[in-house]
Amino acid sequence: MAQISLNNLAHSYYPNPKEQSDFALKQIDYDWQDGGAYALLGPSGCGKTTLLNLISGLLSPSTGEILFDKTDVTGLSTEQRNIAQVFQFPVIYDTMTVEQNLAFPLANRGVQKSEIDKRVSDMLMTLGLQEKAKRRARGLSADEKQKISLGRGLVRYDVNAILFDEPLTVIDPHMKWQLRTKLKELHKQFGNTMIYVTHDQTEALTFADKVVVMYDGEVVQIGTPEELFEQPAHTFVGYFIGSPGMNILPVDVSGNLARLGDHQIHLNKSYSNLDGKIELGVRPEFVRIVDKAQNLTSAIPLSIVAVEDIGRSKIVRGEINGVSINALVAEDANIPLEAFVEFDVDRICIYNDAHLVEGSF
Amino acid sequence: MDKPVNNKAWFFVLPVFFLVAISAIIPLMTVVNYSVQDTFGNNQFFWAGTEWFKEILHSERFHSALVRNLIFSFIILLIEIPLGIVVALSMPRKGFWVPVCLILMALPLLIPWNVVGTIWQIFGRADIGLLGNTLVGLGVNYNYATNWFDAWATIILMDVWHWTSLVVLLCYAGLVSIPEAYYQAARIDGASKWKVFRYIQLPKLHRVLLIAVLLRFMDSFMIYTEPFVLTGGGPGNSTTFLSIDLVKTAIGQFDLGPAAAMSIIYFLIILLLSWVFFTVMTHYGADNNKTESGHDS
Amino acid sequence: MLELINVSKRVGSQLHIDNVSMTLESGSLNVLLGPTLAGKTSLMRLMAGLDKPTTGEIRVSGVNVVGKKVSKRNVAMVYQQFINYPAFSVYDNIASPMRLAGVDKKTLDTKVREAAELLKLTDYLDRTPLNLSGGQQQRTAIARALVKGAELVLLDEPLANLDYKLREELRVELPRIFAESGAIFVYATTEPQEALLLGGNTATLSQGRITQFDKTINIYNNPGDLTTAQTFADPPLNTAQVNNVDGALHYGEDRLGTVSNNISNGQYTVALRPHHVSLQRTDAYSMRIRATVGTSEITGSETFIHVHTNNNQWVVLAHGIHRMESGEQIDLYLNPQKYYLFDENQTLVQAPDNPAPAQSVADHQQSEAH
């Protein structure tokens, strides 16, 4: 187990990168705390897998260095870094039994037979695979195979980190819940540093203590799930996290007043000297649909485009002055004929050229 | 799976039926016809029943040719399969050298059998051949025309040179289809090169190896042109394989009945052995196929 | 109209499709929902005519088409993998089925541009598929399926290989695109959320059988049996085996409340969605049970708490952020009005009071949008 530090790390797949756009991973400086659960979240091509491969040593960086507990490992191979990795598609040794699969990394490292037996039987218990110990691994279901891949890392008690590359891609929704919970339990139990790459926000937020959101080779925000939800540092984070994502509305802001076309929205903070593109962000969860009868001064008329019943809630899709806006309302909520929207003023974020700006009281 | 029946499809198959009938079934029937009759020329035939079959099955000459064939095929498989795997493993996976290697590998396969025979016949000659002359110059008493061991060695060498490429190409195709994640996982698990081969590459090559073994077995069991061109079955009978013996019997001695019976027996042996190979190897990987071909929902 | 009448498909000793009967109307969107190996792909192959049913009939507009070739059937299919002609431009990819059908140049051009507009591909018509993102590649494949003018369009988990966010966007757009075409759409997915977002009708599949076929939201609200309810639940349903004694539900030591008198005594299964279990008492009817926390997962605005109660594994979806330690004892409050009750044959005997139907304006606008 180790703290993993990235110093000025950057990577380009070109031999002589010249411009910023040549880099698949633009410069990153970050310390991954020992025993932390991290997620790298972003759309495909954002550089998250590149970063994972740099940490595991499958790629070597164009610039910068990687330290494990202050020791420079930049030049070390995957084997020497002593990490474990679970891949998108389950990798198991087809001809071996479940037991032999789990014993394999230990046997390769010359661990004593009695110690191997003990650890393997403990691990079978932990993973709930005791009954299948003697079965050929290739006959198992996808989620069991992923458990074995994970188990091969966990039996080595001394791994510096366990890396996951979209491990739930081939797992059915119901099994995803079980496997995810299992991962979480194992993290608690073993205390390994875990880094989990995914494009699925639910997986990232539920798994990690800290989520690293990446976009176009850059880290746009690192934060706890609450921070990412409540204070997205960038409009991309607002859009990417949450379903549906944050409503981003073009506005003019002066002081504590935001203007959306003819409508005014009172803010609880005041903003000064903003120039560039100004946008107001508010999550669908914090958009209330109100009746005209309630006649609140702050309410803005909404023309409803569609109401989607998605079971436990409804998505109201509408437009204000031709700008589309979504609201998330309770499953048994009534949608009034003449609808107005109102924003939860404490949950409004203001963005200047896509970056969050702090207001003052 | 049963697909919707389309009767028009039969029209497309008809030409093939026609060709197969002319090229295989009718000759085969003629052979069967000869095998149960005797003739003294003049197109007069007499019923001989199973006599020729009995004669062949009890013939010393047939037995020794069959044993020669079996030993030959065994040696060929023993050399070409491992050699093919080793060469495929050492070929580059990407970059400039991939097409170069592939073309070099494919070259021997493009050369006709009798040309291969002729090349090696000259190559191995003690007086003017590069190989023969060099060996003799090194003090080796090499002569494929008089020494049975030299003759065998030359024929085996020739076959290995000619056909190992096929095994290489098949294995190479199998190897490149293994996802990169398997190698990465093995590195992370600290597996040695040998273990990567034993637990990842070999299991994944299982199917192409089945094809390689079958093809190389059938082909080597039917070997004819090369020894015919090189040694003509000699020295003595040391390289007289079944096919050469068959031709000697049929065309050299004009014993049509025994030759026909022999070719039927020969045919049945190949069929039987191929079936045995196939069953053993597919059975071994039966549950493997099930999971890998298991389609989604 | 596509009708399947007692269709079964046997491969070797395995029954892949077990006596399926269903009628799909023109212009409808039909979701096939079920886990991997439930028979979704097998059923689609039968509908397309790629496979022949072992028994049963498949009728298109009342005519039996079993045995009719796929190429004669006017079917289009979109797969999980993005299948396009790699050497063709997006324009030529979309145009290809019409070129094969010999459509005149002018009509072809109009139709390709219409489809491209609908699928937001207008700016990419000159590119080849390999220079597109995954989402654009799949849009191209969908556009090609649409311009073919097929009576039946089959989509087999078309969004499974796309990023989560792209999926979300396409899910919103697809119903609108489908509605403009008028063909019968069949859409296979493993994800309940996807079915709900697409709307239309849903058929839930389990082990080759269709367990229910109805309007999507109706199945979600009124699953006919426990299997259907579990297939249509993400996060999974919480279940408890209870004993009904004169209207009182006994769950081990706990009581889970009362049910109406016309439900006879005996064993039942109570099922409850995770967001109907709360950490605070919400009203006077709430029933309290004790639970032990396993793990908790925070999604940003909500918390999933995995708990054990009387040997059952439950999930609670609680509003807000709750950090709980593993092993902690907590109280859970259940609202009996939100119970699904299944009898010993796993048939639904009671569903929650349906949420108040959305008012007419919303309904109207919803149907217009779909």
Image (cartoon, coloured by chain):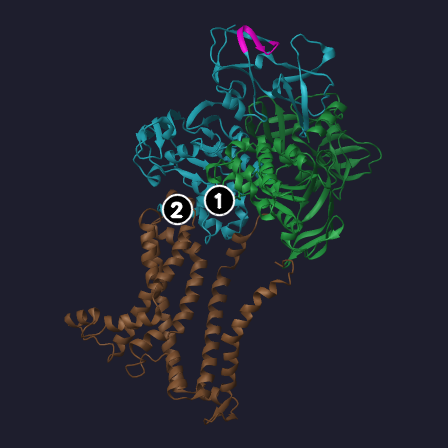
Chain colours: A cyan, B brown, C green
Main SS category, magenta section: strand
Q: Nearer the viewer, residue C174 or C297?
A: C174
Residue at 61%, 65% (x, y): give it: B10
Residue B160: quadrant of the picture: bottom left
Q: How far from the left and from the top, in percent, is residue A38?
A: 46, 29
Q: CA distance from mark 1 to mark 2?
A: 13 Å
Taking A324 as reference, is A82 left or right? left
Residue at 41%, 51% (x, y): give it: B200
When the figure is inspected, residue A253 is found, relative to residue A125, above or below; the finding is: above
When the figure is inspected, residue A156 is found, relative to residue C63, above or below; the finding is: above
Residue at 73%, 33% (x, y): give it: C221
Q: How far from the left and from the top, in percent, is residue A236?
A: 50, 23
Taking A356 as reference, is C147 left or right? right
Numbered mark located on residue B120 in the image: none
Q: Secondary structure at mark 2?
A: helix
Does A171 lie within the magenta span? no
Q: How far from the left and from the top, in percent, is residue A47?
A: 42, 31
In magenta, the rendered stretch is A252-264
The answer to whether the residue labelled 1 contacts the one labelled 2, judged by CB atoms less than 8 Å apart, is no
Question: Which amino acid, by three-letter code, is at mark 1?
Answer: Pro
Chain letter behind tag 2: B
Does A255 lie within the magenta span? yes
- Return the residue at label 2: B183
Is residue C94 visible to the viewer in this orientation of the structure?
Answer: yes
Numbered mark located on residue A90 in the image: 1
Q: Nearer the viewer, residue B5 or B207?
A: B5
Q: Secondary structure at mark 1?
A: loop
When the figure is inspected, residue C129 is found, relative to residue A212, above or below; the finding is: below
Question: Which amino acid, by three-letter code, is at mark 2?
Answer: Tyr
